[in-house]
Image (cartoon, rainbow, N blue to C red):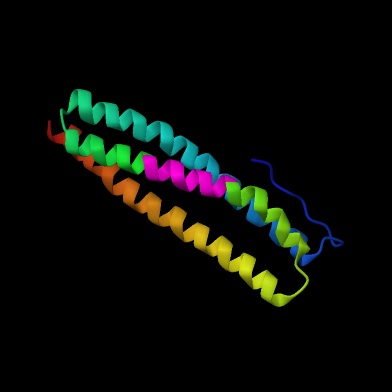
Amino acid sequence: METSTFFNHNTDEEIIQVKRTQELDIWITHLNYVTDESDWLAKIASNKLNDKLLRDALLESSEQNANILNELYNYRTSIVKHNECNDLECDVYYINLHDTYCSRYRKHLETYRKIKSDVYMKILMS
């Protein structure tokens, strides 16, 4: 990921926009990796551990991951509209929207990590 250099002539809004977009790109990159990882773990759960329930939990998590990724991609294309804001109410809307996506991302990761830990515990116990 590229880091951005800011200058004195950059407005607060420009800096916030760049930072928000960078954060969003990190989430998308991470969830793309989670897609691959959950697929690998589902295969391990099914083929090596013979645990269909764990496999199904991973597949369900993978589906949820795909849904969140799709939402983040859509949000990524709409984030440009924030530049069109010219009042505080509009700014607050986009700040709250970003926080909503952040919360969904973090909650999804928390759930996924619990399932992932279950896979590792099963591997260690077998």
Res 93 quadrant in image: bottom right
Furthest-top residue in view?
47
Q: Is residue 69 magenta?
A: yes
| Residue 34 can be seen in this image | yes
| Percent x, y of residue 38 | 35, 35
Left or right of 12 on screen, residue 58: left
Quadrant where the image shows the N terminus = top right
Q: Position of residue 117 (x, y in %)?
A: 26, 43
Q: Is residue 125 left or right of residue 99?
A: left
Could you tell me which quadrant the C terminus lies in? Answer: top left
Closer-to-camera residue (115/10): 115
Q: Main secondary structure of the magenta part?
A: helix
Q: State the extent of the magenta-drawn residues as a range.
A: 63-73
Task: Report the front residue among 7 and 41.
Answer: 41
Q: Residue at x 76, y 66 (%)?
A: 12
Is residue 120 visible to the viewer in this orientation of the structure?
no
Q: Is residue 92 magenta?
A: no
Tell me which residue sits at (22%, 42%) in the image.
118
Q: Residue at the location (50% across, 58% down)?
A: 102
The residue under the point 33% across, 47% down is: 113
Q: How many marks?
A: 0
Please state the horizontal and vertical placement of residue 88, each as a whole percent of the image: 71, 76
**Which of the 4 image quarters holds residue 59?**
top left
* Image position of 88 (left or right of 59): right
Q: Is residue 54 left or right of residue 101?
A: left
Q: Position of residue 77 (x, y in %)?
A: 66, 48
Q: Residue furthest bottom?
A: 88
Q: Residue furthest right?
A: 9
